[in-house]
Amino acid sequence: MPNHNKGIYLAFLTALISGVSIFINKFAVTSFENPAMLPTIKNSLVGLLLLAALIASGQWTKNWARLKSLNKKQATQLLGIAIIGGSLPFYLFFIGLSQIPAVNAAVIQKSLVFWVALLAIPLLKEKVTKTQALAVLVLFAGNLIIGGFKGLAFSKGELMVLLATLLWATETILAKKVLRAVEADIVAFARMGLGSLTLVLFSLVTSPSDIAKIGGLNSAQWFWIALTSVTLFAYVSSWYRALRIAPAITVTAVLVSSTLITNILSAIFITHAWNPVLTLQGTLIVAGLLLITRSSKPQSRSDQPIMVK
């Protein structure tokens, strides 16, 4: 199976994980008085899980050699990914989410594909056909058809979510460049491991009392932390593998379909109903996915990853 097709399949897997994760996080975030506390703890646990995975893979010696072989530029890029991908945007997103309706946050966050496209065309030299452009518009249109969405108010919370989305878009472009020479697992560990350290340090400065409360968390809170940590671990692992071997615009567009997964779970476990609006939204998302997958073409050979030995 060509790497390009494998990348798209991994992007679908990432979208599935993301849809489940979004559904779970709706419940998890309400369990914490300070919404920034959840990403700080779970990101730290994911960093530890990724480190454990690197060690348990049986290739720790090789992975350690790869880490030591990183040049100064690559190490700086990994640090950049940690800050603009694994720390600051999480803080901005969860704080913003606590101040605005969840539906508004979802619409803003799903604009990620537009920002990635705007950056990927000049910086990664990715090509976008008319069919691909139509697919992106159809996918985003599907996410606009959400019950309860009454438009954007351009409030502080919405601007925080938008800034988080812009940072994740920038991280996607930087990660795509780094993944040409660095293993996906190492990039993922840098993002979550170093990123979580940044979040912890930031919390110690801004709200040290919250750090002190970690020992007093109840069993329900630890349950949500554990569950969201597992889904985030799976998400990061599959996302970077997809991004390494498929165009950034394609994998980001496929990720938009996570909304459909979240809606299905909500209909099964919460509302116990499926209405015409959800049917229209699902139809648009499926149509957009068919367009993006059928029109996407593999990148040139020069864009294929060159792994560090």
Image (tube, helix red, strand yellow):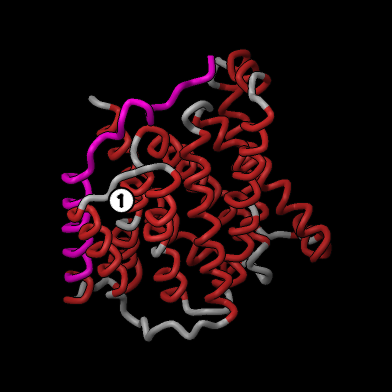
Please state the horizontal and vertical placement of residue 145, each as a whole percent of the image: 27, 75
Disc 1 marks which residue? 254
Please state the horizontal and vertical placement of residue 166, each as a whole percent of the image: 51, 61
Q: Residue at x 63, y 40 (%)?
A: 47
Q: Residue at x 58, y 79 (%)?
A: 99
Q: Main secondary structure of the magenta part?
A: helix
Q: Residue at x 35, y 82 (%)?
A: 148
**Count of residue discs:** 1
- Give yes or no for residue 34 being in the magenta stretch: no
Q: Relative to 179, is 284 above or below?
A: below
Is 106 situated left or right of 203 in this image? Answer: left
Question: Is the residue marked by circle 1 packed among few (<14), some (14-19), or many (20+) residues within 10 Å?
Answer: many
Q: Relative to 245, is 117 above or below?
A: below
Q: Residue at x 50, y 61 (%)?
A: 165
Q: Amino acid at mark 1?
A: Val
Residue 306 lies in quadrant: top left
Q: Nearer the viewer, residue 67 or 279?
A: 67
Q: Nearer the viewer, residue 66 or 60?
A: 66
Q: Relative to 259, is 71 above or below?
A: above
- Give yes or no for residue 308 being in the magenta stretch: yes
Read off the magenta span. Answer: 280-309
Specify the quadrant that holds the N terminus. top left
Please state the horizontal and vertical placement of residue 121, each as a whole percent of the image: 37, 49
Is 16 situated left or right of 82 in this image? Answer: left
Q: Relative to 188, is 278 above or below?
A: below
Mark 1: which secondary structure? Answer: helix
Residue 73 lies in quadrant: top right
Q: Nearer the viewer, residue 295 or 88?
A: 295
Is 1 situated left or right of 29 in this image? Answer: left
Please state the horizontal and vertical placement of residue 68, each as a whole percent of the image: 68, 20
